[in-house]
Image (tube, rainbow, N blue to C red):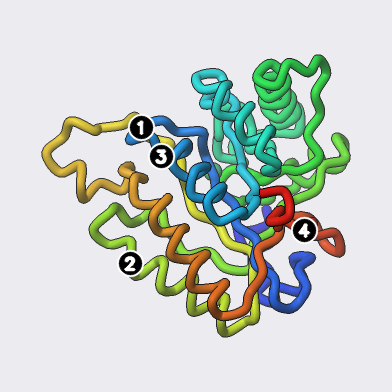
Amino acid sequence: MISLFTIIRRNPRQTGLQPGQVALTFDDGPNLEANVTPDLLDVLHQHSVKAGFCLVGQQIRRHPDVVRRMNQSGHLLINHTQSHHHPIRQNVATLLDEIEACDREIGAALGIDGYRSDYFRAPFGIVTFAVRRAVRRLRLKHVLLSHYGWDTRVGPHHCESVVDLLIDNAKRNNGGMYVLHDGSLCPPKVHEENWNHSTENRSWVPEAISRVISELEKHGLQFVLPGTIGTPRDARLRAAA
Ligand SMILES: [Zn+2]
């Protein structure tokens, strides 16, 4: 088995980014609890920034209209498997099933028969031998990261530290490829008393991203679509705005 850290390249240049470029990715959505993903799309639109969305098939089935909106807005759709099972318990055949099932959900949402993803992120970022074989078989490209901030361990009350770390990292490294989670893998507990402290409460993500974009643009950094090594795509569409 190969660990989580195989998708992390501490040097942002090894994720395909040029100096001064930042790429944002969002995992495990779409999520309509607290309207997180639509609010996030609004924030990205306001800043004219394009991002990558690592989509879980089961979530796509619940909110296909949100996936259509992502696609129409020029964001990158990334296959994150149908059920987000831990790769360690999967073999090549079950992984292929999981990836292809997610593609069918994306295709159904977009109205495209036989849709095939170009990009993939393994659940939990864990790249096992079986993941590598499945990805090679389907000619997918891994979407890498240059920093992992463990944002799933914080709720609204502790998100500032994670966001500060991300901003500091991007300034220090003159860019980077980052992830925050708009989705949650656990069933929502929105009516629970401690919801405001819950790590499943992702409602802080849109505002946090607005701050990330504002501060890093002020610092002179440019936001681009996450691509793979050597092929970052320009995410700025100011001319079209
Ligand atoms: Zn995930």
Separation of marks 1 and 2 at Cα, in angstroms: 21 Å
For disc 4, the marked residue is 234
Which residue of the protein is positioned furthest toward the left in this rendering? 193
Closer to the camera in the image, 44 or 100: 44
Q: Quadrant of residue 178?
A: bottom right
Disc 2: CA contacts within 10 A as few (<14), some (14-19) or many (>=20): some
| Callout in the foreground (3, 4) | 4
Q: Is mark 2 within 8 Å of ligand 1?
A: no
The residue that appears at 62% across and 36% down in the rendered structure is 70
Residue linked to disc 1: 33
Task: Residue under label 3, please give it.
Answer: 36
Foreground: 224 or 29?
224
Rendered residue at 55%/39% (across/down): 86
* Crowd rating for badge 3 (residues with CA inside 10 Å; few <14, some 14–19, many 20+): many
**Distance of label 4 from label 1 (alpha carbons):** 30 Å
**Mark 3 vs mark 2, CA separation in Å:** 17 Å
Question: Please, what is the three-letter code of the amino acid marked with disc 4?
Answer: Asp
Residue bearing mark 2: 160
Secondary element type, mark 2: helix
Quarter of the render that holds ligand 1: top right
- Asked if disc 3 and disc 1 are in contact, CB closer than 8 Å, the reply is yes
Residue 81 place in picture, x, y as percent: 64, 32
Q: Helix or strand or loop: what does disc 3 sit on? A: helix
Residue 107 on image: x %, y %? 73, 20
